[in-house]
Amino acid sequence: MKRILLAAVIAIFAINGCAPKEDKAAAVASDFLTNFFGMNYEGAAALCSDDIANMLRDTVAADEYPSEVIRAKVIEASKQTTFTILCSETEEESGAVVVSYEVHPYGAVGNTAIPHKMRLEKVDGSWKIVALE
């Protein structure tokens, strides 16, 4: 009886130790959003495909603000913005994972949540963001 119980416990730990690909992709999505809203754009770009990374680097210029006051307010708003990962689903045909999440902007009235999705694919063995919606 003890052997059966021990085998069941080991099996449960083995199953839980192997995170499904949806969880791994969602972790990359979370790391991306943490870096992005923390204004670590190079860190965020490292988690993206080359196309998305280049677009991010070209679009977000951290030093181009009309004044230091505006720059400080942008930094504060960005760092106080939060997000919630809602779910992740695997596309059966492509194997890509679509992560649904909400952004909760700093200073928004009420419980404002803006829904978004991102698509991740395996690129050179790592999950990379290939599309942002």
Image (cartoon, rainbow, N blue to C red):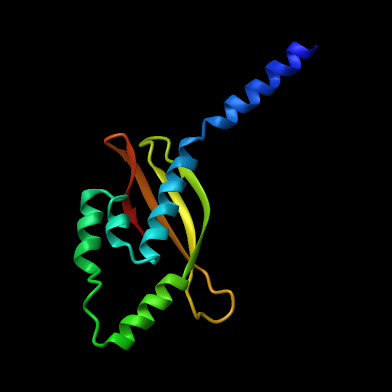
Q: Position of residue 45 (x, y in %)?
A: 28, 55
Q: Is 43 situated above or below 12? A: below
Residue 53 placement (x, y as % from top left)? 24, 55
Does 107 appear above or below 83?
below
Asked whether, in this view, residue 112 is left or right of residue 123, the answer is right
Determine the residue located farthest toward the right in the rendered image: 1
Figure quadrant of the C terminus: bottom left
Q: Is residue 105 above or below residue 40?
A: below
For residue 104, side relative to residue 70 (left or right):
right
Which picture quadrant has residue 97? Answer: top left
Name which residue lies at 74% across and 11% down: 3
Q: Is residue 32 above or below residue 14?
A: below
Q: Nearer the viewer, residue 117 or 43?
A: 43
Which residue is pictured at 20% across the width and 57% down the height? 54
Query: x and y percent of residue 30 in the render?
Result: 45, 53
> Which residue does the image show at 22% across and 60% down from the upper left?
55
Q: Position of residue 128 (x, y in %)?
A: 32, 45
Figure quadrant of the N terminus:
top right
